[in-house]
Each structure stands twice: as structure tokens, then as C-alpha cells.
Image (tube, rainbow, N blue to C red):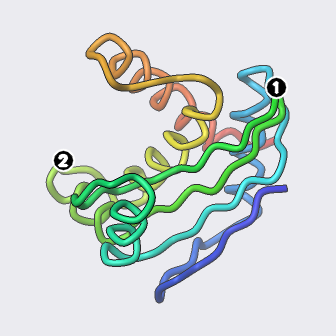
Amino acid sequence: MISFHYELDFALEDEQRYADWITRVIASEEKLPGEISYIFCDDEYLLTLNQRYLDHDTLTDIISFDYTEGNMIHGDIYISIERVRENASDFGVDFEDELRRVIVHGVLHYCGYKDKSGEEAALMRSKEEDKMRMFHVEQ
């Protein structure tokens, strides 16, 4: 089950559409959706998690805690709406597009994709683009 939680004054316009899309993304990677929680928050909330659990003292747009077991995807994905808005502005893209990129980025990590090396990051970006196109496909 995919669930959405909000720690700030923000909400997805159509949670079911997002949940259906994420489910299709997971299926396209030959995985099964388990319990996946998206928690939308602000920079301060995410910075606290980053410091407490990852020992990083930097702002970031996403932190994911992966509890995947085999092919069953489980995890908690925290997204800073402030970072997403700023990144969208910096990259000259629509906020909704950047938000979908970050949402799918987290689940792609659970599917086994990394982004530490240049080659890994290029593959991750390509997968993000492919999966973002799936958002506009109605089932």
C-alpha cells in the first residue's frame, strides 16, 4: 500500500493517481509494491533526519529508508517540498515535474538503482525520465 503523509501545508492534488503511477513504476521493474510511505515535509524536518540518521549536515530534497525484502518494495520516503520548489526554479522546470522526479527517484533506489558514480547517475536519470512519462499514461 502506498500512503502519503504531510508535515506541512501541502498536499498532492490526486493521491490515487500518484499511487497508481508508483504501482505501475514498481511493476515495470518486475517488483511488487509493499508498504511505501511518502512523507512531505520542509527543509528543517529533513535536515533533522539527515543529521540524526545519516550524520549529514546538509539540505537535501529526499531521504529514503529502504525496508525492501526480495522483490517486495517497502520503505519511507521523505521529501522536502522547499527543496523541490527551489530545485525546480534552479533547473527551470515545472514544480510538478520536479516533484514527480523526486517521487520516482526514491522508489527507483528501492528497485536497485544507485546514483553515486557518474554512470549510475546517468542511468538513474534515464530511468527517471522513462518513469515520469508513465505518469501521463492512464490505466
Can you tell which of label 1 and label 2 is closer to the viewer? Answer: 1
Q: What SS does tag 1 mark? A: loop
Residue 84 x/y as whole percent = 33, 60
Q: Quadrant of the C terminus?
A: top right
Is 37 placed left or right of 31 in the picture?
Answer: left
Looking at this view, is 12 or 64 the one in front?
Answer: 64
Is 39 placed left or right of 36 in the picture?
Answer: left
Q: What SS does tag 2 mark? A: helix
Residue 132 x/y as whole percent = 53, 38
Q: Amino acid at mark 1?
A: Gly
Q: Quadrant of residue 46?
A: bottom left
Q: Residue at x 46, y 62 (%)?
A: 79
Disc sitting over residue 54 in the figure: none
Is 91 placed left or right of 138 in the picture?
Answer: left
Q: Amino acid at mark 2?
A: Phe
The outermost residue toward the left is 90
Which residue, given by chain and number where applicable, does mark 2 sit on? 91
Tell me how far mark 1 sits from mark 2, CA to CA: 35 Å
Q: Residue at x 57, y 56 (%)?
A: 77
Residue 24 x/y as whole percent = 76, 36
Q: Quadrant of residue 72?
A: top right
Disc sitting over residue 70 in the figure: 1
Q: Earlier in the sequence, mark 1 or mark 2?
A: 1
Q: Residue at x 44, y 44 (%)?
A: 101
Looking at this view, is 106 or 127 the one in front?
Answer: 106
